[in-house]
């Protein structure tokens, strides 16, 4: 277990590093320049930026977090955010992401099984071209194609559509990994032995092969979770969902620097939580992970 | 010694990539009037002076150039970091790899957005070191994209250095530079090309997404910025004609780069 804790400790270290890096990057922006000719914002806006980031104050880098803790609004205008609003927006994005993850796992399994079945037929070309089409399609394109039905006509639920469009790329990505792992596992001796003893193909697949494929799937869940949350930024923007992704994009567009610092750190913390969940699931389902720990 | 044969799939991908680049260059730069007068998809709703074909192929050229530059820079930085890590070895190599892993865990789109915000503020204040919006995007994409290649190059170098012919050469007194130039680099070269080609679609898609949000100020417009400024057309009848060509071109680029990168990658694993 201690090796797992060491890995988790490394991931947790990412949070303060991201918090400090994003804070000092924002604080170093020319918003803080002393040269009025080069400054792009009005003096009163500049003063509010300085207050928001706590520039020039002792332990000023803690200022955004202090404001959130006290329930004050972060940001220089009504587009800012309070701690409660941030938590609500984050829960919205995470909810959409979790539904998308479930859908992605479904696509992955379906794609892998179809590819294994069509491997020696002419239809295998379809399973070869599908990943290229999925990887070459940024999330915002299917979102745009669905947008008239969702936004204008209100025929479809925006959250469900967002989850659907976000899930396609991760689903196919996970599917290719599972399919490769399936290809390898299906040629192993234990499969031939099980089939030779009279077990049906379905039973061999579900009882023996798939449990050996799950670890490959788990390895990819971390990067896929990152992609799901980043993809939700685009989907939320197109469908007008008022969650974390929309907040982040608007904060960058409106140069709400303190909101960017806090949102970036919260996002990094979320990735750590995902990493923790993946490690725990790995220890639970993969005996090799348990045996590897001293 | 004759090098390994380039797989047919890699050739198909490279030819498709070359054809896309050549077409967009000819259509957007050399013969811009042809697309202005013969486009079957009609005028762009947001800029009626231009046709959809002009905007799509012009955007393809910009996206392709940015993808190639950012992919090349990220690959070069990754290779430099990997070689430095291998040269240092031991504890330093371990720490460098840990930093690389931490960087790799960060989401591309989010970091590029933050870098664009910082870079544009520098640009406005005249402190971007001569970089325009395109240069800024290339640097941002390279800054988030080097970690993956660095990890791959380091692992490949470690594998190559463990081979018997390298050990024999080292035992015969070969120096580090000699080993790199005569034994490691020829074996590493196709792998560098495969990694570069795998970075190309990632860079183009990340740029497209950030430009779509309206955060990057790409001018002339890339495919992503074009889609970001024109998607309101979808609410009108037949508005899909604005989005579909740009989408098709994005898929073709990724298909071409992925085909060649995968084929070269498989060949490298077998070698």
Image (cartoon, coloured by chain):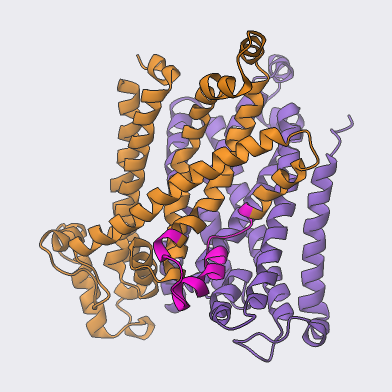
Q: Which chain is orange?
A: A
- Above/below status of A292 relative to B57: above
Q: Is residue B51 visible?
A: yes
Q: Is residue B160 one of those drawn in magenta?
A: no
Inspect this view and state whether residue B64 appears. Answer: no
Residue A209 x, y percent position in the rendering:
56, 22
Q: Colour of chain B?
A: purple
Q: Nearer the viewer, residue B156 or A135?
A: A135
- Residue B52: where, in percent of width, then height? 70, 80
Instruction: Give whichever of A15, A185 is nearer the camera.
Output: A185
In-image side of A49 versus B11 (left or right): left
Q: Nearer the viewer, residue B182 or B72?
A: B72
Which residue range is magenta in the image?
A134-160
Q: Is residue B84 above or below residue A96?
A: above
Magenta-drawn stretch contains A146: yes
Q: Is A192 displayed left or right of B20 in the figure?
A: left
The x, y position of residue A13, in whole percent, is 31, 40
């Amino acid at each position: 277990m201690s090796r797992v804790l060491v890995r988790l400790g490394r991931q947790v270290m990412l949070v303060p590093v991201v918090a400090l890096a994003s804070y000092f990057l924002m604080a170093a922006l020319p918003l803080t320049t002393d040269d009025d000719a080069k400054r792009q914002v009005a003096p009163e806006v500049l003063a509010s930026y300085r207050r928001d980031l706590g520039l020039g104050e002792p332990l000023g880098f803690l200022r955004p977090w202090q404001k959130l803790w006290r329930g004050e609004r972060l940001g220089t205008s009504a587009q800012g955010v309070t701690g409660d609003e941030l938590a609500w927006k984050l829960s919205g994005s995470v909810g959409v992401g979790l539904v998308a993850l479930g859908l992605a796992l479904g696509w992955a399994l379906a794609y892998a099984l179809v590819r294994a079945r069509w491997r020696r037929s002419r239809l295998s070309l379809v399973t070869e071209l599908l990943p290229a089409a999925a990887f070459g399609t940024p999330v915002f394109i299917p979102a745009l194609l669905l947008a008239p039905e969702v936004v204008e006509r209100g025929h479809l639920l925006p959250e469900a559509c967002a989850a659907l469009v976000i899930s396609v790329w991760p689903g196919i990505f996970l599917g290719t990994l599972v399919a490769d792992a399936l290809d390898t596992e299906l040629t192993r001796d234990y499969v031939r032995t099980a089939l030779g003893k009279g077990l049906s193909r379905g039973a061999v697949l579900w009882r023996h092969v798939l449990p050996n494929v799950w670890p490959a799937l788990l390895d990819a869940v971390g990067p896929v979770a990152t992609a799901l949350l980043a993809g939700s930024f685009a989907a939320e923007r197109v469908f007008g969902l008022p969650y974390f992704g929309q907040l982040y994009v608007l904060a960058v567009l409106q140069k709400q620097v303190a909101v960017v610092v806090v949102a970036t750190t919260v996002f990094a913390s979320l990735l750590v939580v995902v990493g923790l969940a993946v490690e725990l699931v790995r220890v639970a389902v993969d005996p090799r992970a348990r045996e590897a720990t001293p | 010694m004759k090098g390994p044969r380039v797989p047919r799939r890699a050739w198909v991908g490279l030819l498709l990539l070359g054809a896309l680049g050549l077409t967009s260059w000819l259509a957007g730069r050399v013969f811009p009037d042809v697309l202005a007068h013969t486009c079957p998809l009609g005028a762009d709703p947001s800029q009626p002076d231009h046709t959809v074909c002009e905007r799509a192929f012009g955007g393809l050229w910009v996206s392709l150039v940015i993808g190639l530059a950012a992919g090349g820079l990220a690959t070069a930085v990754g290779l430099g970091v990997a070689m430095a890590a291998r040269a240092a070895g031991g504890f330093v190599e371990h720490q460098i790899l840990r930093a690389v892993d931490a960087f790799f865990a960060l989401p591309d789109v989010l970091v590029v957005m933050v870098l664009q915000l910082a870079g544009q503020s520098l640009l406005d204040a005249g402190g971007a070191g001569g970089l325009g919006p395109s240069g800024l995007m290339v640097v941002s994409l390279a800054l988030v994209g080097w970690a993956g290649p660095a990890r791959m190059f380091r692992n490949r170098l470690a594998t190559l250095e463990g081979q018997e012919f390298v050990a024999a050469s080292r035992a015969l007194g070969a120096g580090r530079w000699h080993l790199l130039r005569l034994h490691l680099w020829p074996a590493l070269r196709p792998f560098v090309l495969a990694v570069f080609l795998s970075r190309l679609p990632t860079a183009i898609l990340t740029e497209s997404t950030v430009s779509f949000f309206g955060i990057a100020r790409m001018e002339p417009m890339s495919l992503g910025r074009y889609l970001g400024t024109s998607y309101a057309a979808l609410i009108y009848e037949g508005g899909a004609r604005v989005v579909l060509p740009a989408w098709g071109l994005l898929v073709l680029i990724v298909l071409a780069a992925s085909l060649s990168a995968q084929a070269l990658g498989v060949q490298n694993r077998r070698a």
